[in-house]
Each structure stands twice: as C-alpha cells, then as structure tokens.
Image: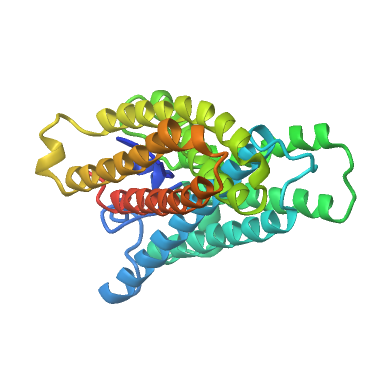
Amino acid sequence: MANEGEGTLAVSEPVVATSTTEVSTAPRPGDVDTGAPPPASGPSSSSGIDTVNHVSRLAQNLLGMSVVGYLIFAIACWRREEILPAPRVSIAVAMVIALAGLLEIVTISRQLDITFRDAVSHQFSRSPLITTCAASVLAIAALSVLTNQVRSRSSFRALLALPCLGLLVAPAFDGHAVSMGPRILHALSDVVHMGSTSIWIGSVIGLAVVARIDRRQLSAVAQRTAKVLMGTVAAVVLSGVVMTFIIIDDLSSLTDSTWGRILIVKVVTVLTAGLIGAVHHWRVVPRLASRHVQIKFQRSVTIEFAVLIAVIAVSSWLVVAMP
C-alpha cells in the first residue's frame, strides 16, 4: 500500500508515498545539488517547502488510490448500476488531487529556484503533472455524468480507465527511486503495487459504505470482495518485495539505515492490516447475515482503513529517507 501508495507489505517504498507509492521525485536537499541553482531561501524556509511537498504527494497518493480503488469496488464487487458511482464525490476528490499535484510542482519550482513554467517541464514534475492531468480528466468525466451529457454506461466505463490508469502509473515516471535497478522491472512493479494497493484500500472503504447504507447486500458483496482481495494482497506483497530488493544492497540495510528501519515499521503496519483482513475473511464474512456481526464488521473495517492510511503515510516517510 502506497510510492503507496498504498495496504502494502514489503512495499516499494519510493512508490507508495508517492503515490501506495511511493517514489517522490520531488527534489530533496540531496537532489538539488547536481548543477541546479541552490534554493534562494534559507534552511528553515527550505524545510517548510519540503513539508508542503511531502504533504501534497501524500494527498495525491491517498486520494488517488482511494478514488480509483473505490470505483473498481463499486463496479466489480458492489456492482452498482449507475454510470458512475458517487459522481459528486469523484469530482471533489479529483479536484483536490489536481490541486495537490499543482502544489507539488510549485514546491519543485521553489526548491530548484526556477519559474513554475520551467518546473512543469522538469523531469521531477513528471509524476505530479501526470497526476494532475489524470485527475482533471476524471473530474470532467464525472461532471459530464452529473449533467446527463453521458448516458452510455459501458462506453463511459471504458473511457474511465484512462484517468484511473493515469493516477496509478504516475509514480512510475518519478525517475529518482524508480530509476534504481532495472528500470522496466521497477516501473512495472510500481504500477502493480499501486494498483493492488488501490483495490485493497478502495475495497475497505467500499465495505464500510455498504455496511452503512446497503446492509441487505453486505454479505454477498463481502464474499465477492474477499475473493478479489486474496489475489490483491498477494500482489501487494510480491510487488513490494521485488521493489525492496531492487533498492537495498543486502538484508543488513534493513537495520543499518534509517530507510530500512522505517521499512520495517511499514511491514509491521501492513501485517496488522493484513491480519485484520484475514479475520474478516475467515471469521466475520461467513457470519454477516447476523445484524450484530454487521455492526462489529463496520467498526473493524473502519479500523482497517485507518491502518491502511498509516501504511501510506509511512510510505511517504520512506521517500524522504531514500538511500
């Protein structure tokens, strides 16, 4: 879970924070001394810019993965008949994501002491620029549904794949941590990690919604979701392990470096979310016909969502400590 994007086991750390994700390519102090002009502001100001940069990236990852994962859940597991589930929410979230992407580009221009126009074309801005464009397209698409300009569900959902895919692949264009190791392998692992993390977190959000407003379908929806999440969580773990071993030189790096120790914290957090999910799968879902169990399920799903948010936050922290 996310560069984190992103419920994620041994995750590609640079990718979930970004975006489950996790690779922040926005320049940090160690990134800016390769020929670029030094920041004009002093250390305290630079620290503040870095904080804004990391917060904006965290917002892009968390909201991007949540909206994409929820839409997939609503269409595939909940099987809502609407052309676009929750169009108003989609518009609002997409606009916030787009603004967060623009804000990150602004911080990059400040860190490199260049104009916003130059920052837009800079390699460090590829990820937030793709995210901003994808979120803008998603907002426009949702608005077209809300204003009844679109009536065909099948064709619209096919087009919906474009902005959703854009939100998931954006971290693969970060270029900093993703450039470590085999480029294609790392990028593909990043996309798989972001996508599977999105489905995990979106499904948890969706189950909480179903438990609150559609309890009659909760048992059937939860059973379908449980089957999907088995493969999803496996993909999160596998892609995270691949990216981790691309980044580290050996296992001693996990204890000898700040990045490795933060990764351990993330792994523990992911295991916690996975344990809650396992309890849901094996003990709770089969008994969801009971009203009492439904109420307890709603509470535990909320806890799982909070843990997944922590996973994405730790992933963002990992980006700052990149080796």
| Location of the N terminus (image quadrant) | top left
Quadrant of image for the C terminus: top left
Give the x, y percent position of residue 86. 71, 52
Q: Is residue 187 above or below residue 109?
A: above
In percent of width and height, residue 237 lies at 35, 30
Q: Which residue is more in the foreground, 303 or 271?
A: 303
Q: Name which quarter of the figure residue 233 lies in.
A: top left
Rendering colour mode: rainbow
Q: Nearer the viewer, residue 280 or 153?
A: 280
231 or 141, which is in the foreground?
Answer: 231
User: Which residue is found at the position 42% from the left and 27% from the top?
Assistant: 235
Q: Is residue 87 above or below residue 257?
A: below
Say which quarter of the image contains residue 267: top left
Can residue 25 be seen in the rendering of this structure? no
Q: Is residue 230 left or right of residue 273?
A: right
Give the side of residue 275 with respect to residue 265, left or right.
right
